[in-house]
Image (cartoon, rainbow, N blue to C red):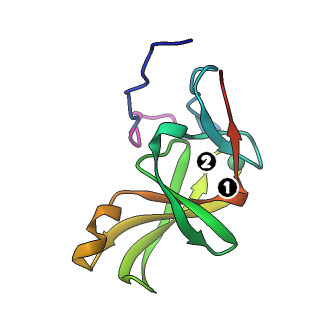
Amino acid sequence: MSSSSPSQHSQASTSSDAQAAPPMLDWLPDDTPRYVCAECGAHLALQDEIISKAFSGRDGKAYLFSSTLNTSLGASEDRHLLTGIHTVCDLSCKGCGKTLGWFYLKAWEHSQKYKEGKSIMEKVALEKVNAW
Ligand SMILES: [Zn+2]
C-alpha cells in the first residue's frame, strides 16, 4: 500500500549539455502500476494516465494516454483519419527506438480537440506491470 501519488510529469527536459550520453530514462517507483516497453522494458506511462482503451492502432488495440515518459517524437505529418484530419508525430521508445504509436499535435475537428497533446500507444508494444 503506497499513498504517494506520482504527480510530477516530466516534460522533455532540456538538460544543458549532455549530448553524447546514452538516452537517460526515467524510472517510476516499483510500486507504481505502469506500462512498459515490451521490447526493452523502459517505463512508458502510469496506468492512471490512460484516458481510453477504445482506440485502434495499426496492429489492433491501442490506448490513449494523457502523458508518457521515455518517448521521443518524430516529424509531424497530417493524417486523414476516420475522425478527421489530425496532425500527428510518430512516438517511439527512447530506450530502444521502437515505434509505439503516435502523438496528437493538433486535431482539426472540434469534437476531437481532447486528443491534442495526448499519445496513442499500441497495446502490442506495451507490457502491463501491476504493482500491488
Ligand atoms: Zn523500448
Secondary element type, mark 1: loop
Q: Which mark is residue 97?
A: 1
Q: For the residue marked with disc 2, what is the amino acid? A: Lys
**Dot 1: few (<14), some (14–19), or many (≥20) neighbours within 10 Å?**
few
Q: CA distance from mark 2 to mark 1?
A: 6 Å
Residue 41 visible at all = yes
Mark 2 in CB contact with mark 1 (< 8 angstroms): yes
Q: Which mark is residue 94?
A: 2
Q: Residue at x 39, y 33 (%)?
A: 16
Residue 5 vs residue 86, the one in the foreground:
5
Q: Is residue 86 above or below residue 130?
A: below
Whether the residue carrying mark 2 lies under 8 Å from ligand 1 is answered with yes
Q: Quadrant of residue 23?
A: top right
Whether the residue carrying mark 1 lies under 8 Å from ligand 1 is answered with yes
**Dot 2: few (<14), some (14–19), or many (≥20) neighbours within 10 Å?**
many
Q: Quadrant of residue 21?
A: top right
Q: Is residue 70 above or below residue 8?
A: below
**Quadrant of the drawing holding the C terminus:** top right
Secondary element type, mark 2: loop
Q: Which residues are magenta?
A: 11-18
- Does 13 lie within the magenta span? yes
- Does 71 lie within the magenta span? no
Q: Main secondary structure of the magenta part?
A: loop
